[in-house]
Image (spheres, rainbow, N blue to C red):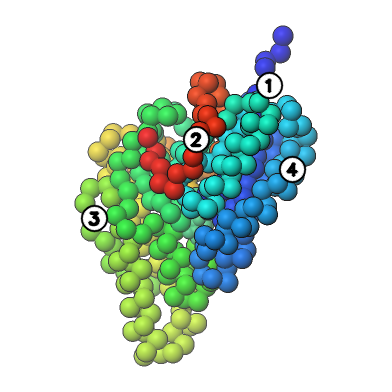
Amino acid sequence: MGKEKIYILGIESSCDDTAASVLCNGKILSNVIASQSIHQDYGGVVPELASRAHQQNIIPVVDQCLKKAKVSKCDLSAIAFTRGPGLMGSLLVGTSFAKSLAYGLKIPLIDVNHMQAHILVHFIEKEGCEKPTFPFLAMTISGGHTQIVKVDNYFEMTVIGETIDDAVGEAFDKSGKALGLGYPAGPKIDKLGRLGNPTAFKFTKPRVKELDFSFSGLKTAVLYFLQKNTKENPNFIAENLNDICASIQHTIVEILLDKLKLAVKQTGINKIAIGGGVSANSAIREALKKSEQKQGWKTYIPETEFTTDNAAMVAIVGYLKYLKKDFTTQETTAKARLKIQ
Ligand code: KG4
Ligand code: ZN
């Protein structure tokens, strides 16, 4: 008898991406994302607009996802959805949709923590892709979070450091906004920064205790730096854009790396996985790769499509929970704030 096939539909709607993915025994059959461009005009995600767009997108996205996977909804073993953390209006769309579909199909419903999903994305079955072994450290860096997490097992995770104010993605986005780069600015700073000198300008790094982070000071430092220099030379930004981007990025990479070094020292764990939108950043990826030689670390860097919000990461958590028969009920509710444990 062949191995039973477990098909999990994952649904992600925590912020501004409506996404669905089907996995068969942990392997991706389809992975569809509808990103919302509407927020670009506002310099950030507008929650009300995000939930409206999710409502418009959710049915076509799930439909396309099932078609691409060549799977009928009747073949699904369970539905996994992001319960939180995230924007309440956005989460409600995915949560209600997943609950209704699971109810209609009479199949199990599985709730997923978005931040756990960013970490467990490393366990998607892919040929030639090495999975982390436990215990390892995960650094989750996104527009809403900056955490270092000690991962002892799939569902045994402890946050050992986190930001006390802004997330690292906000440092990219707000600095980029001041540079006139629009939203989200992270990918643009990355692109321009590659052409600039990372040590052209110096920004002070925050002093924060132990493994915690702070990024609000860096954002203010960039603002003052730009104000002062544009007063002296109105063309300062245009003339130095690549160097400014490279220098901001360099500072951020140093802040992250310093904390990782401390985390490795404190825990004695030298296996590091990264996840979240900011882990798409080329300078961060390069610095981590180099650390394998320099620090003797083993690093796990997801493919770029699995760094930003996606539903394959939700579906893999769904699969791992399915194996444990860890299901939720129709009474479940979305949670804007949801701790990793
Ligand atoms: O994980 P994500 O898609 O959504 C949240 O859960 O926040 O992360 C979005 C964040 C944004 O702040 C965006 O600017 C940042 O990830 N980002 C990047 C890059 N790509 C996305 N930041 C720096 N470099 C990149 N290449
Ligand atoms: Zn995310």
Label 4 to label 3, Cα distance in Å? 47 Å
Pointer 2 and pointer 1: residues touching (CB < 8 Å)?
A: no
Depth-wise, is mark 4 or mark 1 nearer the camera? 4
Depth-wise, is mark 4 or mark 2 nearer the camera? 2
> Callout 1: helix, strand or loop?
loop
Q: Is residue 210 depicted above or below 50 in this figure? A: above
Question: What residue is disc 1 on?
Answer: 5
Looking at the image, can residue 309 be seen? Answer: no
Residue type for callout 2: Thr
Question: What residue is disc 2 on?
Answer: 332
Question: What residue is disc 4 on?
Answer: 63
> Callout 2: helix, strand or loop?
loop
Q: Earlier in the sequence, mark 2 or mark 1?
A: 1
Residue type for callout 4: Asp
For residue 200, which quarter of the picture?
A: bottom left
Residue placed most toward the observer, 63 or 235 = 63
Residue placed most toward the observer, 90 or 203 = 90
Where residue 271 sits: x, y (%)? 39, 36
Residue type for callout 3: Val
Question: What residue is disc 3 on?
Answer: 208
Depth-wise, is mark 2 or mark 3 nearer the camera? 2
Quadrant including the C terminus = top left
> Callout 3: helix, strand or loop?
loop
Label 4 to label 1, Cα distance in Å? 21 Å
Where residue 283 sits: x, y (%)? 46, 57
